[in-house]
Image (spheres, rainbow, N blue to C red):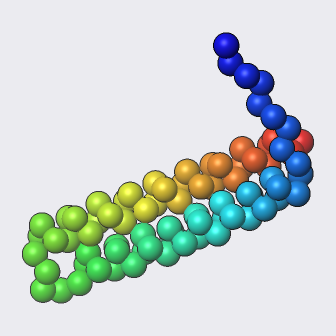
Amino acid sequence: MRSLPSIVPADRLDRNIAECREHADHYKRLSDHYKRLSSASGISKDRAAALKNIARTYVGLAGQFDRLASLARNEQR
């Protein structure tokens, strides 16, 4: 039997939204960093591919935090 979701206080949701935005921004910056590293001269194609994959992973993670913040905002309504 599934339990009903509990009501989360609005101030806690506000903190969660802000925290999600912070994380999203952080992972976007990391993605940019690894993308820059992947285009550095003198690195192997394999290293560049790995760095691009890491950058892509961070972009995906940032997107999930953005999505979570959006869901939390919608729950406040």
For image coordinates 65% across by 49% down, the residue present is: 68
Q: Establish if 31 lies above or below 37.
A: above
Q: Establish if 19 lies above or below 4.
A: below
Q: Single out the residue that lies furthest toward the bottom.
A: 41
Q: Is residue 57 left or right of residue 17?
A: left
Residue 38 picture location, percent across and down? 26, 75
Q: Single out the residue that lies furthest toward the top.
A: 1
Residue 49 picture location, percent across and down? 20, 64
Q: How many labels does the image show?
A: 0
For image coordinates 83% across by 44% down, the residue present is: 8
Residue 29 picture location, percent across and down? 49, 75
Q: In the figure, residue 17 lies in which quadrant?
A: bottom right
Nearer the observer, 13 or 21: 13
Q: Establish if 69 lies above or below 26.
A: above
For image coordinates 72% across by 44% down, the residue present is: 71
Q: In this view, does 70 lie to the left or right of 63?
A: right
For image coordinates 42% across by 70% down, the residue present is: 31
Q: In the figure, residue 77 lies in which quadrant?
A: top right
Q: Is residue 44 left or right of residue 39?
A: left
Identify the image quadrant of the N terminus.
Answer: top right
Residue 3 picture location, percent across and down? 73, 22
Q: Is residue 19 left or right of residue 24?
A: right
Nearer the observer, 62 or 39: 62
